[in-house]
Amino acid sequence: MTSTLIADRTDHSAQTAIDLLLSRRSHWPLSAPAPTQQQLQHIFDAAMRAPDHGRLRPWRFITIRDEARHAFGNVLVDLAAARAPDEPRDAHEHRRQRAMAAPLIIALVAAVDRSSSVPELEQLLCVGAAAMNMLNAIHLYGYGGFWATGIDTYEPAMHRALGLDASERLLGFLFVGTPQKEKEGQLTRRPSSDAYVREWQPIQCDAARA
Ligand SMILES: Cc1cc2nc3c(=O)[nH]c(=O)nc-3n(C[C@H](O)[C@H](O)[C@H](O)COP(=O)(O)O)c2cc1C
């Protein structure tokens, strides 16, 4: 059997793509504009390229934008007020700002199929991989993204506000928009990957049996 690369990568496109991948970072806060509808379609299409055990397609995405962000801000204030019933509602008004921190918010949801032999963990990882593809696509288009969970994500009241059903788990929110202009050399440094990679060595039989 002969094997071959799936595409000719002898041009500069591969290095360009790698350079872009290596320059991704998170951005906060984000301003308008958000990706266009066509770009957003491609960002969601990138999510569909995530590895997906059993082809369960467990990802669900809910977009929150334009005027809906104001209503979402009310939800955030309501949730904070419910957590601290002894405090006046005004004390939680600042929570509203989170809904306005980006022109587009995408709720990341995993629709877990509990009848499947694919473990729930793998289904959640699949949605995480889809989210990462989206963050990379957002970056490739020159926009910025930020994945945040925060205190609200795990609250049943947030699940109700988003209309999730019992099989669905909220994995956080992608905040998407235009990043602030970066200062020269602001790309945050990353550790060398060497410290996180090791070569497996066959373990001595005695040690493996112990
Ligand atoms: C599942 C998940 C949830 C996260 N939630 C938060 C969060 O609630 N607040 C926060 O400041 N960062 C959160 N982060 C981290 C940011 O998205 C971001 O990765 C971090 O600020 C580091 O920036 P970088 O992506 O440029 O390395 C979360 C990341 C992941 C993967």
Image (cartoon, helix red, strand yellow):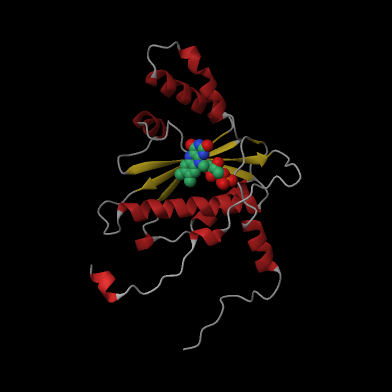
* Along the line of sight, the residue nearer the viewer: 80 or 160: 80
Question: Residue 126: in sight, yes or no?
Answer: yes
* Along the line of sight, the residue nearer the viewer: 83 or 74: 83
* Along the line of sight, the residue nearer the viewer: 199 or 104: 199
- Give percent across and percent down for residue 37: 61, 46
Q: On the rendered structure, is 123 left or right of 138?
A: left
Question: Residue lying furthest left in this view?
Answer: 210
Residue at horizontal 38%, vertical 51%?
124
Residue at horizontal 70%, vertical 38%?
180
Check the picture and name the quadrant holding the C terminus. bottom left
Q: On the rendered structure, is 39 left or right of 54?
A: right
Total numbered labels? 0
The vertical placement of 194 against 155, above or below, is below
The vertical placement of 119 against 143, above or below, is below
The vertical placement of 91 against 207, above or below, is above
Question: Residue lying furthest right in this view?
Answer: 184
Residue at horizontal 64%, vertical 74%?
9
Question: Residue 148: in sight, yes or no?
Answer: no
- Give percent across and percent down for residue 107: 47, 40
- Give percent across and percent down for residue 117: 26, 59
- Give percent across and percent down for residue 134: 54, 51
The vertical placement of 27 against 117, above or below, is above
